[in-house]
Amino acid sequence: MTTLATASFLSHLKSIYPNNGIRNGNIINPWYIVAAVAFSASNRPDAVPHVFQYAMKDLQMEGHLGTNSLEGERLLARKLRDALFKSGLTSGYPRAINSLVALSEVMPEELRDTKTMRRTETPITEYEKTGRALFHNIYGDTADSVQSLLDGAYPDMGWFSNTIGYGLTYGFTEVLSPLETSYTLVAALIAGDTPRQIGWHLDGARRGGATFEEVQAVRRISMEVASSAGVKWKDDVPEVKDAIS
């Protein structure tokens, strides 16, 4: 199988996002999250380990980590794992599983996790509250109409989206920030060619604090990765809006 995630292509993807560098031992350019999810959602799990290894080398070459090197590397690994896990609700868990397995095969032992990150003992009612708050933060003034659409299509879908999707899955923000989670959703949706939801989450990323240029970059990275993997869009991919409500 042809290697899509070449060093030159990954370097190009990294250059698209307007903010680069290292801050407090962490990569602040989320290109690697977007790229890994877009490859996974495009059914190219073989490319995901290359994204991880490139980002890890990038982190190590900066030389600014000092005694925090292992913590920074562990956070990078966790961000990729959680992004792939979160993307499974959108792209399908078979694709997320294949990507996580491929990533695990190149993961250094010291960067692995052996315990569940999410709090499994939390009552489901708490996840309902968390999900409702995150849903409104992402959808803004459109939250009620989107929730009504989901409830009307199938009440179980509305409940699942709010409680399991946004509460349990996306609402865990100890690894990925809410904005990085929005980027994860955008990448998976673009690779999946679902324009209605792409539009929702491009707007959601803007509401989450991203600039117009940053969301444009995430859209472009996702499209270039998906295109390289052979994804064809039936219609145009929604554009980033100048202003949202």
Image (cartoon, rainbow, N blue to C red):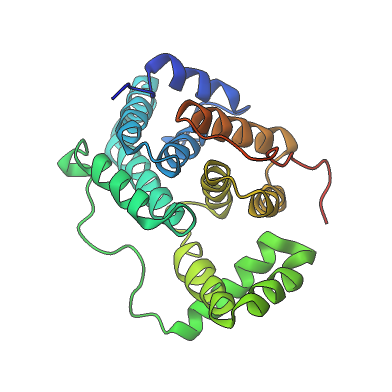
> Quick one: 32 or 97, which is closer to the camera?
97
Residue 237 place in picture, x, y as percent:
68, 39
Say which quadrant the N terminus sits in. Answer: top left
Residue 183 place in picture, x, y as percent:
56, 45
Q: Is residue 85 left or right of residue 129?
A: left
Q: Residue furthest top?
A: 8
The residue under the point 34% across, 31% down is 47
Q: Is residue 168 left or right of residue 45?
A: right
Residue 73 place in picture, x, y as percent:
31, 37
Placement of 15 over or under 138, stated as above or below: above
Q: Residue furthest front?
A: 234
> Quick one: 123 or 163, which is closer to the camera?
163
Total residue callouts: 0
The residue under the point 47% across, 72% down is 164
The residue under the point 61% across, 50% down is 194
Say which quadrant the C terminus sits in. Answer: bottom right
Q: Residue furthest left?
A: 109
> Quick one: 68 or 124, which is closer to the camera?
124
Placement of 116 over or under 159, stated as above or below: above
> Quick one: 110 or 136, which is closer to the camera?
136
State the image quarter where residue 129 is shown: bottom right
State the image quarter where residue 49 is shown: top left
Q: Is residue 26 left or right of residue 227?
A: left
Placement of 145 over or under 212, stated as above or below: below
Residue 168 place in picture, x, y as percent:
45, 70
The residue under the point 77% across, 65% down is 142
